[in-house]
Image (cartoon, helix red, strand yellow):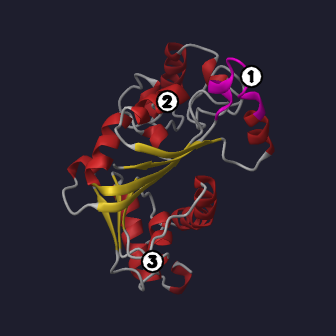
């Protein structure tokens, strides 16, 4: 499928493998949404397109125009090259841009999709305003995201705690942010590869790309957006842990800690 047949392509094997995984995960994304929209003839925007697997999926599904936006130029470079050489049948309908949504000024879209990005957007209310601006009346947003910050693994593996292993459930909630930040800066100075949005000292957990929004925050932000909530589904996963969480979240005071993902459809009215 990829560069073995075309050695002239400068595509990193790990990116190719990640694209293939994403291509397989698209089916899971749509299943968790509860419905796959009719795509034929649609103009579709993906915010946070990464390597472009969902854009390809949408174009193959019949969309007449697909635009993928991301602020990582390396990912955009891969997506552009990959589609041009591996999916030539849709190359004239798919475009990728290294661009923030706030800087986009062009024709409107019928659909906006966002996969695994809302938990990393610091000003989600502002982002929803921009999405609404880019939607045609009656247009819809399909967004799926998680794990939520207060859920068992809401640290996304990015936070080093005092515990001997990073994947301890709720480990990131068991000590103060100040102590976590101090520890991560120390480990960074010792040469450990720590994810951060910038090269300077880590000042907060938000520097790690985690907005720390709670389930209540997401409900409030979406409720204030002026968009109509068509559906709002949580804990959309078939694994055993998700099923246990789905039961425990109904106990008093536990909903925040046992809701791990959200899949919602929003409509511009």
Q: Compared to 75, does 210 lie above or below?
A: above
Q: Which mark is residue 219?
A: none
Q: CA distance from mark 2 to mark 3?
A: 46 Å
Which residue is the site of mark 3? 62
Q: CA distance from mark 3 to mark 1?
A: 44 Å
Circle 1 Cα neighbour tier, 10 Å, few/some/many (<14 / 14–19 / ≥20): few
Camera-nearest residue between 202 and 56: 56
Identify which residue is drawn at 41% across, 67% down. Answer: 79
Q: Position of residue 69 (x, y in %)?
A: 34, 57
Q: Which residues are magenta?
A: 247-259
The disc, 3 or 1, on the residue closer to the chain's N-terminal end is 3
Quarter-of-image position of residue 206: top left
Quarter-of-image position of residue 111: bottom left
Q: Position of residue 243 (x, y in %)?
A: 77, 41
Q: Compared to 90, does 211 lie above or below?
A: above
Which residue is the site of mark 1? 251
User: Is residue 177 visible in the rendered structure shown here?
Assistant: yes
The disc, 2 or 3, on the residue closer to the chain's N-terminal end is 3
Identify which residue is drawn at 42% across, 58% down. Answer: 49
Which residue is the site of mark 2? 188
Residue 256 is inside the magenta segment: yes
């Amino acid at each position: 499928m990829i560069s073995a047949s075309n050695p002239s392509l400068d595509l990193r094997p790990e990116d190719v493998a990640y694209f293939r995984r994403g291509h397989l995960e698209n089916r899971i994304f749509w299943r968790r949404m509860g419905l796959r929209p009719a795509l034929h003839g649609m103009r579709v925007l993906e915010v946070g397109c990464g390597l472009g697997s969902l854009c390809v999926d949408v174009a193959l599904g019949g969309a007449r125009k697909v635009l993928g936006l991301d602020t990582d130029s390396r990912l955009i470079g891969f997506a552009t090259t990959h589609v041009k050489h591996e999916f030539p049948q849709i190359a004239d309908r798919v475009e990728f841009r290294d661009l923030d949504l706030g800087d986009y000024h062009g024709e409107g879209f019928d659909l906006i999709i966002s996969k695994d990005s809302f938990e990393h957007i610091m000003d989600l209310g502002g982002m929803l305003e921009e999405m609404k601006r880019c939607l045609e009346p009656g247009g819809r947003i399909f967004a799926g995201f998680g794990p939520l910050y207060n859920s068992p693994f809401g640290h996304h593996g990015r936070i080093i705690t005092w515990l001997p292993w990073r994947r301890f459930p709720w480990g990131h909630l068991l000590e103060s942010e100040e102590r976590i930040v101090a520890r991560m800066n120390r480990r960074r100075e010792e040469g450990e590869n720590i994810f951060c949005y910038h090269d300077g000292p880590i000042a907060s957990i938000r520097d790690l790309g985690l907005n720390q929004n709670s389930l209540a925050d997401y409900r409030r932000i979406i409720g204030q957006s002026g968009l109509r909530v068509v559906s709002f589904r949580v804990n959309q996963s078939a694994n055993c842990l998700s099923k246990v969480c789905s039961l425990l979240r109904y106990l008093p005071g536990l909903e925040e800690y046992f809701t791990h993902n959200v899949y919602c459809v929003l409509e511009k009215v």
